[in-house]
Image (cartoon, helix red, strand yellow):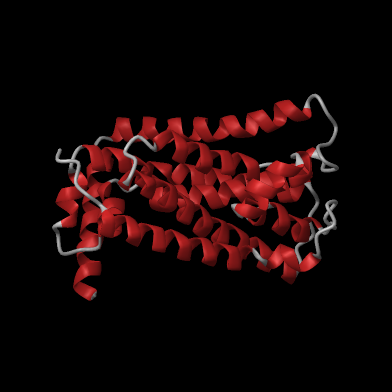
Amino acid sequence: MAERLRIYRELVRAQVRGQASYRLSFALDLLGNLLFFGSDLIAVLVVFRQVPALGGFSLRETLVVFGLAATGFALADLAVGNIERMKMYVRTGLLDAVLIRPLGVLGQLLALDVGVRRIGRVVYSMLLLVVALDAADVRLTPVRVLMLVLTPLSAAVFFCAFFVATSTVAFWWVESGELSNSLTYGGRDFTSYPMPVYGTWLRRFFGFALGFGFVSYYPSLVVLGRADPLGAPAWLSWSGPAVAALAATVAWLIWRTGVRHYRSTGS
């Protein structure tokens, strides 16, 4: 086990050194990631120029929801974001080469392209969350601090699970990238706004069936000290870690099934 961890560490270190050696490219990648992530915030601000509130939530309250979701997603994207290239790994035969090595398949694929350039997204999201909490005049109590620590971590685990689960579809359907992106990024966009904004079927599908409602919306009710306008019980706000653990378990089972039934494309 220790030897495997050492090998993974060396693979990650080599990736970081390789990316850092091209400084201008690294800096442009970092800037591009920040601009891409910042466009989501601009969309929220544009919407609130037209209306004073959405679903009963003000701009400042919505930014807290947005900040919690953005921080969790940025952490997940940093850790496993490159797994969305799964269809390329399958099509080019790289996955076949990885399978014959005496190391875990998922760990090797994640080490192939460590997303150091995505660190800027994490820093940006955390700063945005701090500014949003201050703007919403959130008084920090032990309960709220606990929620502010738990929520980004459980959200990151949830998004990691979703990245892996949706990318696994490529084992059976190589051109599944658009489907995976629509679910992953569609779910991320769903978590950026309070759930009362959406219609009933969207809340049921994304919020409860897929679990995105527990990523940021319900935890934010504790942080903001508000009751749920939809009438959900208060304990639901603390369900994020359990939902994340369930999502991780399901993703792991899907991944193992995909690996066991994978048939090479012959590339």
Residue 114 locus on image (x, y percent): 32, 48
Give the vertical position of 121 relative to 138 (above or below): above
Asked whether residue 99 is in view, the answer is: yes
List the single residue furthest toward the bottom: 1
Residue drawn at x 59%, y 68% is 242
For residue 32, side relative to residue 193 (left or right) = left
Give the vertical position of 222 relative to 111 (above or below): below
| Viewer-side residue, 230 vs 261 | 261
| Viewer-side residue, 164 vs 170 | 170
Picture quadrant where residue 255 is located = bottom left
For residue 87, side relative to residue 134 (left or right) = left
Residue drawn at x 78%, y 38% is 59
Residue 127 locus on image (x, y percent): 60, 47
User: Where the C terminus falls, by quadrant?
Assistant: top left
Numbered circles on residues, count: 0
| Viewer-side residue, 200 vs 74 | 200
Residue 247 locus on image (x, y percent): 52, 61
